[in-house]
Amino acid sequence: MNFSDTLHKNPVFNIIAREAGNLGVQAYVIGGFVRDLILQRPSKDIDVVCIGSGIALAEAVGKALRTKVSVFPNFGTAMLRTSTDQDRDGGADWEVEFVGARKESYRSESRKPIVEDGTLEDDQNRRDFTINAMGISLNPGNFGELIDPFDGLKDLKRKVIRTPLDPDITFSDDPLRMMRAIRFAAQLNFDIEPDTFDAIVRMNERISIVSRERVTDELNKIVLAPTPSYGFKLLYHAGLLDRIFPELIALKGVETIEGKGHKDNFYHTLQVLDNIANRTDRSPILSDNELWLRWSALLHDIAKPATKRFDPKVGWTFHGHEDLGARWVPGIFRTMKLPLNEHMRYVQKLVRLHLRPIALTKEQITDSALRRLLVDAGDDLDGLMALCRADITSKNYEKVQKHLRNFDKVERKLHDLEERDKLRSFQPVITGELIMETFNLPPSKEVGEIKTIIREAILDGVVPNNLESAFPLLIDEGHKRGLSAVKNLSELKLSIVSTEDDKSV
């Protein structure tokens, strides 16, 4: 198989070939770019191996392209970014990494290799899978020729993940490759060749020498796969999931008492994750949070095992699992080395609120309940509703459709109420500062209690959210507690105006 016509269309490859010739070294495109080229998948990352100094070749190419070259001497690699307006999409940003061909050996306690200069054959031998070990020549005599010593092309056609060498050696040398095997299977919808998978089962304890950051990076790629449940089932059957995510394994299994059982929450969770991945709503708001929306699906029922109880009258209950699960989220993120920032708080919020919209479909919907949901969800309402729709799983198609129709009704009411009251950015007009100023109070529990009562009255529609309507309720609540106002409404308004003027200066 020859790709010369395809490569000639991209000036980057022509320049690499020319500069390699000027330096008198052989160069090859290798790895994922070759795989994706054959699969006709978009790829902008190019790995170039040369028989000689990869850094020298990178610097020559960078000079020809007039672009900056980043050099990593400890690793013997260099990288540059470039773009071309000749790409078929009308322009492309390319990241090209250069390395000299090498051979590697490993110590049992580390996945960091001992590296020596090597041949192209040595370099292909060290690759993780046959589909990633294919190369394409950039040399004059055989430009564009596929070099495929391990039948990677055949494995691509068979849709199989297989190691080029003995899988026990491959996974012992670098245990992260076990995660990568499952990640590629999930991303490409490939099978893992039986001997390769059996080796993962045998070697799964070796994952302990890999940093949590690297494991989580691969796990995130599985989470983002087209059908992520496939990857998680492979992780489970390989014995890896228990080592890297035991909380998820705890969801597995069904207990039956007096003929009453509950759903297997492990497989339910994976179905919810798939539902999120395959939803039709691809709004920019949700797409920006795609990874974290999927993590919300993974964790939404994570505390069910800890809250599971059997009631002879109603069967199995999981009361409070949403609140406990939300409290667990920071700890799980910390262990996984996931960010403890707004992404974690997004997941935590969705886990805590995921039952609220479902409850609204089972009862007479009141404006008060809808207002509370809008206020509590805020800007994350779209993600919450997507999660709740995904959470409807049943083998009974009609039952699922009934629940989804109820969700349609709830969403229409939420939309109408939001248009009317603009509640996503809701802030009660009576703040803690105004309460303290009105009654000359210091910060206290009493101030918080009054503020909560007024907030609830506004959300219940008892009083509008404006100062004229809410101030009498504030005075009344103060009188119930024996408090006397030191400022009337007019004085309070003047104070607010003065404060706002001070802030604007």
Image (tube, rainbow, N blue to C red):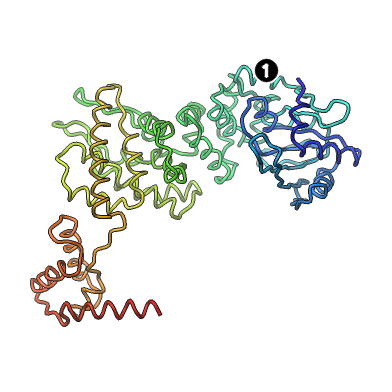
x and y percentages locating residue 216 in the rendered image: 53, 42
Residue depicted at x 18% and y 36%: 362
Residue depicted at x 31% and y 41%: 306
Where does the C terminus fall, quadrant-wise?
A: bottom left
Q: Quadrant of residue 197?
A: top right
- Whether residue 338 is visible, yes or no, is yes
The residue nearer to you, when weighing 213 against 471, is: 471
The residue nearer to you, when weighing 316 against 448, is: 448
Q: Is residue 87 above or below residue 58?
A: above
Horizontally, residue 226 falls left or right of residue 375, namely: right
x and y percentages locating residue 293 in the rendered image: 41, 42
- Whether residue 169 is visible, yes or no, is no
Disc 1 element: helix
Where does the N terminus fall, quadrant-wise?
A: top right
Going by the numbered disc 1, the residue's amino acid type is Lys
x and y percentages locating residue 484 in the rendered image: 11, 79
Q: Is residue 134 above or below residue 466?
A: above
State the residue position of label 1.
154
Label 1: few (<14), some or many (≥20) within 10 Å?
few
x and y percentages locating residue 160 in the rendered image: 60, 21
Count of picture labels: 1
Horizontally, residue 108 falls left or right of residue 405, namely: right
Residue depicted at x 60% and y 41%: 209
Q: Is residue 192 above or below residue 370?
A: above
The residue nearer to you, when weighing 223 against 334, is: 223
Q: Quadrant of residue 305?
A: top left
